[in-house]
Image (cartoon, coloured by chain):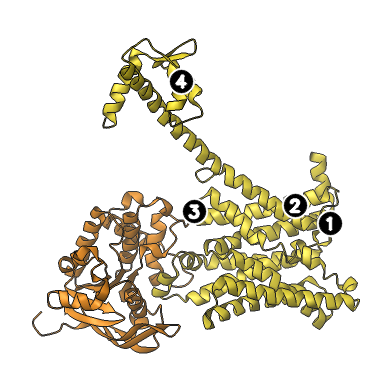
Amino acid sequence: MDNKLPQSAIEITSLTVAYHEQPVLWDINLSIPKGVIHGIIGPNGAGKSTLIKAILGIVHPIAGQVKVFGEEYKKQRKRVAYVPQRTSVDWDFPSDVLDIVLMGSYGQVGWIRRPGKKEKKMAIEALEKLGLANLAHRQISELSGGQQQRTFLARSLVQKPDIYLMDEPFAGIDAKTEKTIISLMKELKNQGKTLIVVHHDLQTVREYFDWLTLLNTSIIAHGPTQEVFSDNTIEQAYGGQIQKHPSLV
Amino acid sequence: MIEYLTDVFSNYTLRTVILGTSGLGIVSGALGVFAYLRKQSLVGGVVSHSALPGIVIAFLVTGSKAPSVLVLGAAIAGWLSMLLVNMITRTTRVKYDSALGITLALFFGTGILLLIRVQMAGMSKKAGLEHYLFGMAATMSHENVLVIGGLGGLALILMFVFWKEFKVASFDPDYTKSVGFSVHLIDTIITSLIVVAIVIGLEAVGVILMSAMVIIPAAAARQWTNRLSLMVLISAVIGAAAGVGGTLIGDSGHHLATGPLIVLTATALFILSLFFAPKRGMAIHWIRQWKRKRRMMHRQIPALLHDLMERTKTKDDGWTIDVIRGLSPYKSGIDRVLNHLKSEGLVQQANDLWFLTQKGVEYVGIDSKDHGG
């Protein structure tokens, strides 16, 4: 990486988000380079998901701004895909896997129009990419955790974005799915895509992420993983919780 | 039967009422699906109760009791109640369910106050406003049916137009925002259509029970299918069936009110669905559970007999069903399983005693190998 920063995919300046006067994110300044797999780690309640939602304009900051490829999110929306936490939706919804993956085309299709043949083909390709082709007509209420996660990833692939924002994609999934996802992430990175991933397992941080942000309401450290991921910064981010964290013992 | 049907169809009043109640059932059934899936079933209750002051005020302002006028008043009040709920949850720390309760109390309280005021002033006879409390399907007019058909039809058309948006926003609102749809706008449209579905049914079913018609058909339909389009269709059919069923029972001359009968018919259909729907129904669940238990017993009882045989080291001893039952974790259905095992030649019976056959001994051996010893 040398000292020269690559051109940034996302630029955040003085971002502050609060829920009922309680700051969740405090004065965040962040530049996320293009073409990297970028991890966001920090303890529970550190504001990791909120940071992603603030980038996507889902939560409104009380101060600061977010630029995506140098412009407002609204203008670059079609270049960004959001992969929410698997557990943030009720999977007992009357739909099959293909239905959900097809939702990845809704942003392109826009209001009222329905996805057509082209979109369906893209959805099926995404399903194949994630090994879900045989589950296309499976009811989503019957999916395992790993299959749910792959469904969400397939949906994001349909968007053909340049930036992926993933919230805990490795939480509660089987080892095989974890491998599938990480190799997909690396493949996307090699195509020049940027992946921003909220993560909780400190053991895999070095292996998975080129760049890293340690977050606990404000930024503790930010930069290339090998430079910023140290006992010292982890201690700062996790504070008293460090002893309790099993992966570090 | 045929005579009865001709009777029904030649009776103009009854035909009008059936058209109206089945129409309101279709609309509330279809749109109720979205309230159900968004876990907003209580919204229906708030909207329908909150419509009451709108009805009374519409009458007081216009002096008219035309269905179109009163429905408009009801819709405005119902819609304002939802606006208030949103305002409370956005600007205060009061939780959503409390905001619903508070809003319902405020609007319904005001409505009752105004209704009694109108009654005291002796205007109510003329207006028949108290019908709106418990519903009065029997007096449904042609104009009322037109209101149900017109507004309800429009609501259904809009549901089809915004189908994709309703679906994605009901499943994953944050994602929907991220791809550029205004979830706030989608929410507003869905809520407005649910308001329409409710207010067109108020005269027939009443403000107190109408909310049931957006919850119950949808909850029943969910048991039958895993596809959104089918769920909406089934829910509409159940709503219509409840409307027709309730009306016909009400018409059968036992001095029973049609509104509550419609809601109770819907409830009966819901209970039937809960028990007998394939996959989700409780009946199929019980059958599966029982089959699983029988399969377990089928393995466990020969193993138990084998174990007893090994311990006593004799092949001639048999055991009574009481001994077997005492040692088995399963207490019921043992005699049936024993008889089934007998028919397969795995056990034998002599007098009251049960024995494992040679085939049974082999079965236990194979079975324990199959299941890792």
Residue at the disc numbered 3? B227
Q: Earlier in the sequence, mark 2 or mark 3?
A: 3
* Residue at x-position 81% and y-position 42%: B4
Q: Give the residue type that dot 1 points to.
A: Thr
Residue at the disc numbered 2? B246
**Callout in the foreground (3, 1):** 3
Q: Answer with the quarter of the image where residue B86 lies.
A: bottom right
Tell me whether circle 2 and circle 1 mark residues in contact (CB < 8 Å): no
Q: Earlier in the sequence, mark 3 or mark 1?
A: 1
Q: Secondary structure at mark 3?
A: loop
* Residue at x-position 34% and y-position 15%: B359
Q: Earlier in the sequence, mark 4 or mark 1?
A: 1
Q: Earlier in the sequence, mark 2 or mark 1?
A: 1
Q: What shade does chain A have?
A: orange
How many residues crowd mark 2 within 10 Å: few (<14), some (14–19), many (20+)? many
Work out how far the residue at label 2 is from the one at label 1, CA to CA, in angstroms.
15 Å
For the residues tagged 3 and 1, is the chain the same? yes
Chain of the residue displaying label 2 = B
**Callout in the foreground (2, 4):** 4
How far across and how far down the image is residue A209, in percent? Answer: 18, 70
Chain in yellow in the render: B
